[in-house]
């Protein structure tokens, strides 16, 4: 590839500071958000002043070499990342540059600074060129009809024709880099999905590549550390949307050390536990709820997500999958389609569906705030609630059984509502409370008292 030799005095003719762009094949036949080589937009005056486009008070652009377009091409050819492209363009244009994905998240650049309007992206796609956007410029990135993201420049309200062409050429390079990045991510996710499918169906086998050590080594080669604690989720939105849901799940995990596969008629996700949840919160519940919302947003479907128990070894995955499937079925049966949760969020139903009975955990999740309050203050909220339900929710009979004034019963129930929430007496919640009140006295009772 021949390199352009810059004019000895580029200030004499700014239009010659960079060569007229060569029309190169666009990524996968797409405009890639670029109209490199076109003139300035109609109605936008061209200035003869080589300083046009410099924002008052902003740092002046660094001197640019006519070899800049070739350097951009070189970045693509040698497999550079978007961060290198951003740095190259930032120096050449004297401004802040970022590459954003199709969801508006920064791939390269400073994420907190970029707030790109969807309308500007669509306008750039429609016009096939860079367009002004706030305090800078934007160029949509695409491959045919597929939206890849956008290239964003901030800190320069005006761009001269030469700089605009360079920015649009940068958009072509950014689209190509995103395509390469996506292809690599797709291949990696496919390999991880195949591994997850093997782990879910794994049985003791004499074959060397099916032994636990071999599976762990295979996972490490794919960037998965299966010695860490993971969560397994099962997502479902109906049989006709399985492929669509799988693609959305792969997109959701694009930059995370997780795996996605289709198994037993549903989509299965494996994600590492990234941080311990705050006290009183269940990591599996929170992860399932967040995943259900995100997959629902990406697919525009009601996605139900069930979480299995945390797994610490590959051998635990089949049992975790079975529990997650039961959770999805229970969520639907309870009228919670389109939501996410684990058996811990299903109350006594979860105790019945869980891989192992956990009555103490059920009591703690249901009555924990009352038990803690009584222990700390010497009150009798649990006893009052047991009497209230035992007397058919009659305040008069409850106060007689407790031997207190009716106002005392009312005050105690008000405290129960403050600790458990205003819906504590709703039919479904009241049933959970009554079951927990019956199980609680049985915990740790000596056999001689049973």
Image (cartoon, rainbow, N blue to C red):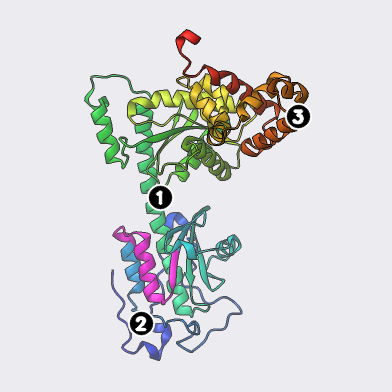
Q: Are marks 3 and 1 in contact (CB under 8 Å)?
A: no
Q: Label 1: state its secondary structure.
A: helix
Provide the residue designation for mark 2. 63
Q: Is residue 74 left or right of residue 107?
A: left
Expressed as whole percent of the image width and height from the top left, the position of residue 86 reads 39, 66
Q: CA distance from mark 1 to mark 2?
A: 33 Å
Provide the residue designation for mark 3. 406
Front residue (pair 378, 316): 378
Q: Are marks 1 and 2 in contact (CB under 8 Å)?
A: no
Q: How many marks?
A: 3
Q: Is residue 239 visible?
A: no
**Which residue is rendered at x = 32% and y = 40% of the image?**
224
Q: CA distance from mark 3 to mark 1?
A: 68 Å
Provide the residue designation for mark 1. 182
Q: Quadrant of residue 88?
A: bottom left
Q: Is residue 178 above or below residue 414?
A: below
Q: Label 2: state its secondary structure.
A: loop
Q: Which residues are magenta?
A: 76-98
Q: Earlier in the sequence, mark 3 or mark 1?
A: 1
Expressed as whole percent of the image width and height from the top left, the position of residue 44 reads 58, 80
Q: Is residue 348 left or right of residue 418?
A: left
């Amino acid at each position: 590839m021949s390199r352009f030799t810059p004019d000895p005095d580029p200030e004499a003719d700014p239009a010659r500071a960079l060569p007229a762009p060569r029309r190169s094949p666009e990524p996968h036949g797409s405009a890639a958000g670029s109209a490199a080589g076109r003139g300035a937009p109609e109605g936008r005056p061209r200035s003869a002043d080589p300083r046009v486009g410099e924002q008052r008070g902003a740092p002046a652009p660094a001197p640019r070499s006519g070899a800049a377009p070739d350097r951009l091409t070189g970045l693509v050819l040698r497999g550079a990342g978007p961060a290198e492209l951003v740095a190259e363009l930032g120096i050449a244009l004297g401004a802040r540059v970022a590459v954003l994905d199709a969801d508006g998240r920064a791939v390269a650049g400073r994420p907190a600074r970029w707030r790109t309007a969807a309308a500007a992206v669509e306008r750039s796609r429609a016009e096939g060129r860079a367009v002004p956007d706030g305090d800078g410029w934007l160029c949509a990135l695409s491959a045919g009809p597929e939206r890849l993201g956008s290239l964003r420049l901030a800190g320069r309200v005006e761009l001269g024709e030469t700089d605009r062409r360079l920015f649009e050429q940068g958009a072509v390079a950014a689209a190509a880099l995103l395509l390469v990045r996506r292809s690599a991510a797709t291949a990696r996710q496919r390999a991880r999905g195949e591994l997850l499918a093997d782990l879910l169906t794994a049985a003791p086998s004499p074959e060397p590549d099916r032994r636990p050590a071999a599976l762990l080594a295979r996972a490490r080669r794919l960037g998965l550390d299966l010695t860490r604690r993971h969560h397994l989720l099962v997502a479902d939105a109906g049989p006709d949307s399985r492929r669509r849901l799988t693609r959305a799940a792969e997109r959701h995990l694009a930059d995370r050390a997780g795996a996605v596969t289709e198994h037993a008629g549903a989509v299965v996700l494996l994600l590492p536990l990234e941080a311990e949840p705050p006290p009183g919160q269940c990591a599996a519940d929170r992860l399932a709820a967040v995943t259900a919302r995100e997959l629902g947003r990406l697919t525009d479907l009601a996605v139900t997500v069930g979480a299995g128990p945390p797994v610490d070894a590959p051998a635990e995955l089949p049992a975790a999958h079975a529990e997650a499937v039961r959770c999805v079925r229970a969520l639907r049966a309870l009228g919670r389609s389109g939501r996410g949760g684990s058996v811990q969020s299903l109350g006594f139903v979860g105790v019945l569906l869980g891989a192992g009975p956990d009555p103490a955990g059920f009591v703690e999740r249901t009555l924990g705030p009352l038990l803690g309050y009584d222990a700390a203050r010497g009150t009798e909220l649990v006893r009052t609630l047991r009497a209230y339900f035992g007397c058919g929710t009659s305040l008069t009979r409850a106060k007689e059984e407790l031997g207190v004034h009716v106002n005392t019963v009312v005050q105690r129930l008000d405290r129960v509502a403050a600790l458990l929430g205003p819906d504590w007496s709703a039919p479904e919640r009241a049933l959970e409370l009554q079951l927990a009140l019956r199980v609680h006295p049985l915990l740790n009772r000596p056999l001689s008292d049973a």
